[in-house]
Amino acid sequence: MTELLKVENLQKHFPVSSGFLGIGKKRTVAAVSGVSFVIHEGETLGIVGESGSGKTTVSKVVLGLEEPTGGSVQWQGTEVAGESERRLRWFRQSVQAVFQDPFSALSPRQRVGDIIGEPLLFVPGMKKRDREQRVEEVMEQVGISPALRKRFPHEFSGGQRQRVAIARALTVKPKLIILDEPVSALDLSIRAQVLNLLKDLQETLGVSFLFIAHDLSVVEYMSHRVAVMYLGKIVEIAPADELYKRATHPYSKALVAAIPPRHPAEAKPVQPLQGEIPSPLNPPPGCAFSTRCPMVEDRCRSEEPELREVRPGQFSACHFAERLL
Amino acid sequence: MAVTTGEREQVVPAELGRKKRRFRPRLIPHVPIAILVIVVAVAILAPLLAPHDPARGTLVDSLLPPAWDADGTIEYPLGTDANGRDVLSRLIYGTRISAIVVVFGVILTGLIGTAVGLLAGYFGGVWDAILMRLVDTILSIPPVLLALAIIGALGASLQNVLLVIVITAWVGYARIIRAEALRLRNADHVLLARVGGCGWFRILRVHIFPNVVNTLVVYATLTIATVVIYEASLSFLGLGVRPPDASWGGMISEGRGHMNTAWWLTVIPGIALLLLCVSANLLGDWLRDRLDPRLRNVGGS
């Protein structure tokens, strides 16, 4: 398996207050503090976490929409983080994205065919006829009749619009598609259709996905490996089935336990997590999860745990990961 | 559809009905459009339409009332002013001034303001700071004071009135368009346009500008009225078009002294001004509703 994307020690801080006229104390909030992961060809890496855990910020930085504060993002060995828009052009042919809200993701005054074909305008040497042909091809791939290419986005339903958004992401034949909560805004019945469409596309095209969601069961269904994020850090990263069978971080364990059972009769009493995710403005010392952890000890409040390999392929950032084995 | 008695019922298939839609005059778009078309036509055809020379009169005929008054004559349908000049002819020639002012005041300022607003809003940072401080500076000067300064230095003329209008009016566009661009800069479809490989110019042209057109149209039609009134005010104050030439504001100003005896000198150009401004505003409202594709009939175009 070849490595496509390698993210190392990624940091992203946002300024909160710059003081009056830039004088005074500058405060920043760390949305992402030290995230590393790898995505291989044809693989789906899922990222889960509560809102505010930094999932979307990771995707924006990887897409080059935000400049990272520190760390590196490498695409097949070439650094792309913090590059200018002009120099990222080649990268745009390799990485595309689908966002959560299909209603805001499509330009309201562009026809659907133009929306889907737009990324092809920047492919060198592509003629208009080739472009139109490719647009029809991907429209068929995502299950929308090419006859509808002259329509405007508002004439489509949410599920259809998300298909249009997926079609647009596919046109340049990217190697990686970043799916940021692609089904969270859709109805349950449509959700399954879109997820299956994505799976089929991966099978036929061999494209990799970075799949971001807060719904664990969806991530389990889609991903080969899953990274769990908490307060801007990855607390556990493991093959999907391993994580769901035997999580080695108390936070991921709690998340897995909270997935509703398939049948009410299987329901087990769940110990829900107490409290809220701490404010990233003043994260707790030591382990970020120590304020809510059921197995917290003194060491957790002073010493920050490193992400380490607990079992082959399974990494956990907990001092006591072995106890959960 | 409700069936009312006494009315002929028409059953037309939807498709057929759409193709053969008959022209049905409606109050809202058609009356304002008609008025604006008349204003433009009158402005262009002024020399053909005006019965008299607008700048010359005979003192014998001074202060004649309109034709429908017992003392009026058909020769001067809207009466004459203190110098015996024909009010109708002056009104017709005054239309030219208003039309020129609208064309420059709205189109030119709209272009400058939109360009500045889009750039400042989309790029932000230093450019935004510089451009917006310039806007604040211009906004902080009272417009009439600025007009006095510029016209005091350069002299009263139509060109200088236009200069004043362009200097003061573009800032309104810049502010409004900047706010819209700022809002759209981080919209999903703009971010995805960047991911798709669009450069800044294409993003502004294809993904941001079409979404600010509504605001632009509404604001532009509102400024038609403001700009026409601005010129009229400057001419009223004697800072605009010089007296022998006719402008609506100047006519009102000249007629002010005769308000008790010759009402038509102020009321008639006043009504013309009112009709033009109200029409522009009504048309703007209507256009805003019309230009939004989400409100257009599905598959209608």
Image: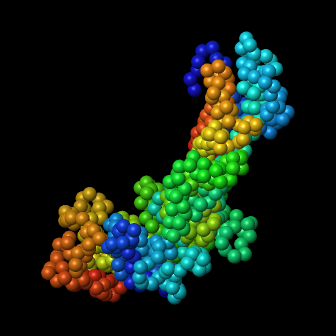
Q: Nearer the viewer, residue B265 or A76?
A: B265
Q: Is residue B156 visible?
A: yes
Q: Is residue A55 visible?
A: no
* Residue A264 pos. (x, y %): 26, 57
Taking the spot 68% from the left edge, 26% from the top edge, the residue there is B265
Q: Quadrant of residue B85?
A: top right
Taking the spot 63% from the left edge, 53% from the top edge, the residue there is B150
* Residue A238 pos. (x, y %): 35, 80
Q: Residue furthest front?
A: B59
Q: Quadrant of residue B264?
A: top right
Report the number of discs: 0
Q: Is residue A169 above or below residue A88?
A: above
In the image, taking residue A79 as reference, residue A272 lies left or right, namely left
* Residue A270 pos. (x, y %): 21, 64
Q: How is the image coloured?
A: rainbow
Q: Nearer the viewer, residue B228 or B200?
A: B228
* Residue A207 pos. (x, y %): 53, 75
State the quadrant of the C terminus of chain A.
bottom left
Q: Is residue A131 above or below residue B223?
A: below
Taking the spot 19% from the left edge, 63% from the top edge, the residue there is A269
